[in-house]
Image: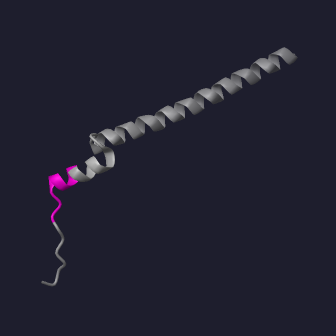
Amino acid sequence: MDTPFYKRKTKKDKERRNRELYGNHSAKHVRIQEHCQENHLQNIIKEKEKNNKHIKDKKKDKKE
């Protein structure tokens, strides 16, 4: 044989690999969790920026 032989990847192999990496969660579930976590962090950053701007505006009003 000229071509190299690669072992077949079965559903059981994929399931075992995912279970080792992610526990009982599916790969799709992990992707969704990561996406939600990124959105949550972005929302926290936006909220902090909003609060900082609001505090700066209050300080300007007190000075005037």
Is residue 49 rendered to the left or right of residue 15?
A: right
Task: Give the residue drawn at x 19%, y 78%.
Answer: 4
Closer to us: 13 or 37: 13
Q: Quick check: is 11 in the magenta stretch?
A: yes
34 in magenta: no
How far from the left and from the top, in percent, is residue 44?
56, 30
Q: Left of 19 or right of it: where is 1? A: left
- Considering every residue shown, the one lying at the far right of the view is 64
Asked if 1 appears above or below 18 in the picture, the reply is below
Q: Quadrant of the N terminus?
A: bottom left
Residue 63: x percent and y percent? 87, 18
- Image quarter hosting the C terminus: top right
- Asked whether 63 or 26 is in front, the reply is 26
Q: Is residue 5 left or right of residue 60?
A: left
Q: Residue at x 29, y 45 (%)?
A: 27
Please say which color scheme the image uses.
Answer: one colour
Q: Is residue 2 above or below residue 55?
A: below
Q: Position of residue 35 (x, y in %)?
A: 41, 39
Instruction: Say which of 52 and 6 sits in front.
Output: 6
Q: Residue furthest left?
A: 1
- Residue most toward the bottom? 2
User: Magenta segment, principal secondary structure?
Assistant: helix
Name the residue at 80% across, 20% down: 59
Q: Which residues are magenta?
A: 8-15
User: How many labels were placed on the picture?
Assistant: 0
In the image, residue 62 above or below residue 32: above
Picture layout, residue 33 above or below residue 52: below
Judged left or right of residue 1, residue 16 is right
- Taking the spot 16% from the left edge, 52% from the top edge, the residue there is 12
Closest to the observer, 62 or 30: 30
